[in-house]
Amino acid sequence: MYFALTEEQAAIQETALAFAKERIAPHAADWDERCHFPVEVVRETAALGMAAIYVPAEQGGSGLTRMDGALIMEALAYGCPAIAGYISIHNMVAWMLAKYGSAEQVAAWMPKLVSMEWLSSYCLTEPAAGSDAAALKTTARRVGDHYVLNGSKQFISGAGATDFYYVFARTGEEGAGGVSAFAVMKDTPGLSFGANEKKMGWNAQPTRQLIFENSKVPAENRIGAEGQGFKFAMSGLDGGRINIGACSLGAAWTALDKAREYMLERVAFGRPIADFQALQFKLADMATELDAARLMVYRAADAIDRADPQSSMYSAMAKRLATDFGFRVCNEALQIHGGYGYLKDFGLEKLVRDLRVHQILEGTNEIMRVVISRKLLGGNRR
């Protein structure tokens, strides 16, 4: 084992961090306040190779590793975890198209995802199917050379602003075996979008329902065979969990930097508050927890790159730990700032609001414990 970044990895991280500090961080509070999705800034990441990070080069992607992807997401989240979170989702969709799409589908759609001419969304969750994703009710009925979709999807990041939707719908029996995957374009007749949800955090990207009302999707837009969709969805989530863990690392990294700087500058009782041992210990714990979470995320990313049979468990462990620790570091940084941390001017309350959802999406942290315990104990224990 070798714990230092290679020169190439360090360069990748430095590029992403520079972009985050220059193009994202200065505007993050404003985007959050206005609930503004900065599409043009997001698209700038495509020129840096960050739209299809681990799509193979022969399919038009950057051909990087999951470890490289984690480094990029962590660095982008230093600027804003909501923006990094959306870019993670777009990368997941691009990878799933590359992995499971036909050569014709990849040739037709991938170039627009790689350039971010098309932004994309991952569409699994439904109003009554969240953690129990296999219970989804959206149907896709084959009629000649197309499918007719009916139903709705809930909590879809980017919905309404994005162009390409990777949708999971039921073509067969109840349960996971009846789910198939489809590429649905924004202008599909019968597809509409709900209102932009009013959220606690992640305000720099829209979240809406997708509503299908007799939406006709060409049969050639089905990805893979009927019944394979749920397997595709779950495989995408392993990488998504690593990335959302990495986004938590980036936000916590920002929070730790802010807390350290504030402790050195703030004077109370006649001396800098950095002199008080209680706060020294708090900062030490924050740094330790951040580093522990970072190591676990990197190990999980490496496990996927090596096709380790335990990679799903490692991904669940990393997601659970990094999102819990990341939230805690941000919350402690706010506490160190006292009343100032509660003000929007300092940016910490935004980090706390943004990171709270990381413990819910890509599988709740309770579901992560289910994944881990099943791997340890075997079977489908209840």
Image (cartoon, grey):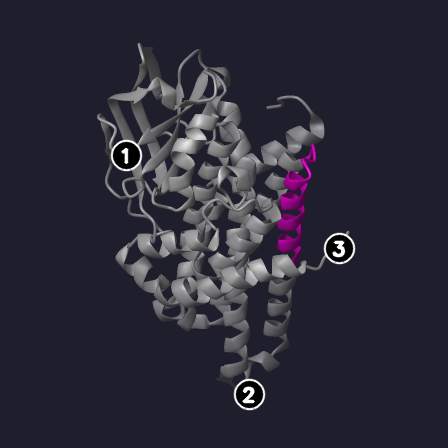
Residue lying at 28% horizontally and 47% vertically, measured from the top left: 198
Q: Quadrant of residue 120?
A: top left
Helix, strand or loop under label 2: strand
Q: Quadrant of residue 164?
A: top left
Residue neighbourhood size for the residue with mark 2, other residues' Cα within 10 Å, grouped as few (<14), some (14–19), many (≥20): few
Q: Amino acid at mark 2?
A: Arg
Residue lying at 46% horizontally and 53% vertically, measured from the top left: 355
- Residue 201 in view of the camera: no
Helix, strand or loop: magenta stretch: helix
Residue 87 vs residue 104, the one in the foreground: 104
Q: Position of residue 332 (x, y in %)?
A: 52, 63
Q: Which mark is residue 296?
A: none
User: Which residue has dot 2 on it?
Assistant: 271
Residue neighbourhood size for the residue with mark 1, other residues' Cα within 10 Å, grouped as few (<14), some (14–19), many (≥20): some
Q: Position of residue 361 (x, y in %)?
A: 46, 41
Among the two numbered marks 1 and 2 on one chain, the one whose residue lies closer to the N terminus: 1
Q: CA distance from mark 1 to mark 2?
A: 59 Å
Q: Which mark is residue 186?
A: 1
User: Which residue has dot 3 on it?
Assistant: 2
- Discs 2, 3 touching: Cβ within 8 Å: no
| Residue at far right of view | 1
Quadrant into which the C terminus falls: top right
Residue neighbourhood size for the residue with mark 3, other residues' Cα within 10 Å, grouped as few (<14), some (14–19), many (≥20): few
| Residue at far bottom of view | 270
Residue 148 vs residue 112, the one in the foreground: 112
Q: CA distance from mark 1 to mark 3?
A: 45 Å
Name the side, left or right, on which 27 lies relative to 308.
left
Q: Amino acid at mark 3?
A: Tyr
- Highlighted magenta segment, given as a residue range: 291-310
Residue 229 vs residue 349, the one in the foreground: 229
